[in-house]
Amino acid sequence: MSSCGAEAGAFVRTRPGLTAPDLQIGAHPGPIPGEGSANRRGLAILVSALDIHSRGRITLRSTDPADPPLIDPAYLSAETDLDILVAGAHLARDITACSPLAGLVTGEHQPGGHVDGPALREWIRGHVGTMFHPTSSCAMGADEWAVCDPELRVRGLDGLRVVDASVMPAVPRGNTNAPTIAIAERAADLFRGIAAPSSQEPVQQT
């Protein structure tokens, strides 16, 4: 109960030549609850794909505003996203095979050390989820498909801006807390009519 959850983390490139990490790893001091694992002693290594190419859809269910929208996250609709997670599963196994951790780990509970190849890909498809950082459902941009313009204003509506992670045009390669704060800071300037600083201007420290 004294743990904050993911006690350690890392950002990893799953293949050479990448300009930025495409995988995030989190080490959890205990098994992930569910599927009969809650009463086991163990640890969990969580892997998260960062360079996401799958795109979901949010559409209206009906003309009744009280009806919840139709949400299709379309997880792993891009095969490259699955490739990253498979590489992450292999890396997690490599980590637990290294000393001194190897002397404490007696086996793999999920999906099981024998699961690999197509079976591992199928297991990942059946267990994938968000890492609590969903974004981009009201993406901003200059093209006709963007929900919001670059000043966070919802296209086609007057007096409405979106100020949260949903305006991000792409999923950032990491946790979304700091980028969301940056969006809120910029929104505060927009509300007050303060222009964005030039890239040539020094940042004022306060």
Image (cartoon, rainbow, N blue to C red):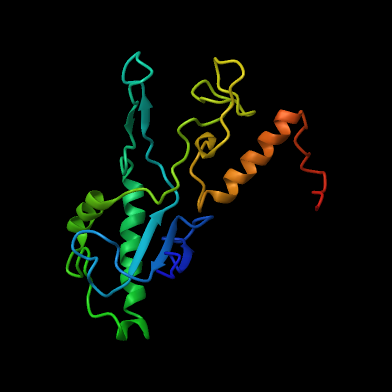
Give the residue at x 24% y 49%.
125
Residue 188 location, quadrant? top right
- Position above or below: 198 against 148: below
Give me the residue at 45% from left, 69% from top: 7
3 above or below 140? Answer: below
> The N terminus appears in which quarter of the rendering?
bottom left
Against 71, is 119 above or below?
below
State the image quarter where residue 92 is shown: bottom left
> Is 106 placed left or right of 58 in the picture?
left
Q: Could you tell me which residue is drawn at 21 percent across and 55 percent down?
A: 123
Image-based side of 25 in relation to 102, left or right: right
Name the spot of residue 178 as percent of width and height, x first.
59, 50
Q: Nearer the viewer, residue 132 or 48?
A: 132
Image coordinates of residue 165 in percent, x first then y, are: 52, 40
Q: Position of residue 36 (x, y in %)?
A: 18, 63
Query: Total label count?
Result: 0
Residue located at (55% from left, 24% from top): 143
Q: Residue furthest front?
A: 1
State the residue in front, 31 or 39.
39
Left or right: 67 in relation to 111: right
What is the quadrant of residue 88 in the picture? bottom left
Q: Please indicate whether residue 38 sits to the left or right of residue 50 in the image.
A: left
Q: Measuring from the top left, give residue 97's x and y in whole percent.
A: 31, 79
